[in-house]
Structure formats: structure tokens, C-alpha cells
Image (spheres, helix red, strand yellow):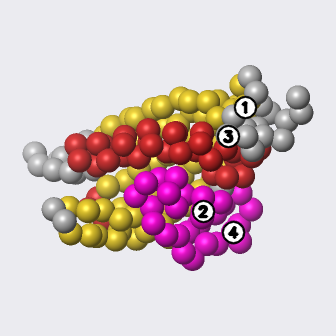
Amino acid sequence: MGGETEVPTRVLTNTFHVDAAPEEVFEHLTTPESYIGLSPLVVAVRDVDRSEPGVVRYTSIERFRFLGLKYDNPIAVTLLTERLAEKLSVRGQVDSPGGVRMGYRFDLSPEADGTRVDDRLDLSAPWLVVGFAAGQARKVQLARARILADRMAGRSTRGS
């Protein structure tokens, strides 16, 4: 028998409001340097490549701390952008060492005096690390919502 074993997956979703226009939020989320501090684990970005329309590639440096030890994890990131009638989207895939893969998507739509952000993470990882990886991803997802809302507050260019 001995077929391939399935890799465990987790889907994490979060919906929140940002007091800025969808275009402003979209611009922020398509700028790699914006992720420094936006995702609490990201401490640097490098090798930004915008040579393909609608695609931004870069290396993100995530810093992890285990038992007082520091580990900087370089990961290749690809952002894909979509502009549909009433919705802007930023999506991508991150492949990290240890077999951890995460697809993510931010759907941005007008809401009241700002933007509704639907944040979805699709995570897969070997069973030994899926729980840890999902826990870290959820912490980052929730923190990112708070940080993004704080960063964008008062930046809207909408008229009164």
C-alpha cells in the first residue's frame, strides 16, 4: 500500500475594517517594505522585483525566537494583484523551510468610510509542525489587522 501521506492543512480567516480608501490599503499591501512590522515576524525585505506587471517578488526575513535563540528565516514571497469591479485583491504564496507553505489573500472592498478587509490564510505543514505554524500564523494575522488599521487611520483621501 504505502501511498503518499496527506499534509495537514489549516484555513484561518479574519475580517476587519480599515479607515482608509481601498486604493490606499491596496497600495500599502503591495509595497513589500510595508510588511516590516505589519507582520510582527518580518524584520526586513530585500531583492524586490517589480519587473512583471501585477506581480511583486521579494525576499522577506522573518525572525523567530525559540528558548532565547534567534533564527532569521529568509522566505521567497510573490504578491499577485487583481483589480475587479468593486474589489481589489492581493494574494500570494510563501514557501518556508521545513515544508511549511502558506497561501494568503486580502480582498479589499469599500465599506462605510473605509475598507473591509477579508484576510484568508491557507496553511499546510508536516504534522509535527502544523500546530505551531498555525498558531504563529494566527497571531500574525490578528496582529496585522490591528497594525494595518492603526497605520491607515486618518490617511483616507475621501472627502467629507
Q: Which mark is residue 32?
A: 2
Q: Nearer the viewer, mark 1 or mark 2?
A: 1
Q: In this picture, which residue range is highlighted in magenta?
A: 31-58
Crowding at dot 3, Cα within 10 Å, few <14 / some 14-19 / many 20+, comes out as: few
The image shows residue 84 at horizontal and vertical percentages of: 76, 37
Per the image, the residue denoted by label 1 is: 114
| Coordinates of residue 95 in the picture (x, y in percent) | 40, 60
Q: Is residue 38 above or below residue 85?
A: below
- For the residues labelled 1 and 2, the Cα–Cα distance comes to 22 Å
Q: Earlier in the sequence, mark 4 or mark 2?
A: 2
The disc, 3 or 1, on the residue closer to the chain's N-terminal end is 1
Q: Which residue is mark 4?
A: 50
Which amino acid type is shown beneath numbered disc 4? Arg
Estimate the spatial distance between the alpha carbons at disc 3 and disc 2, rounded to whole Å.
20 Å
Picture disc at residue 153: 3
Report which quarter residue 121 is drawn in. Answer: top left
Q: Residue at x 61, y 72 (%)?
A: 48
- Residue 5 lies, in percent from the top left, at 19, 47
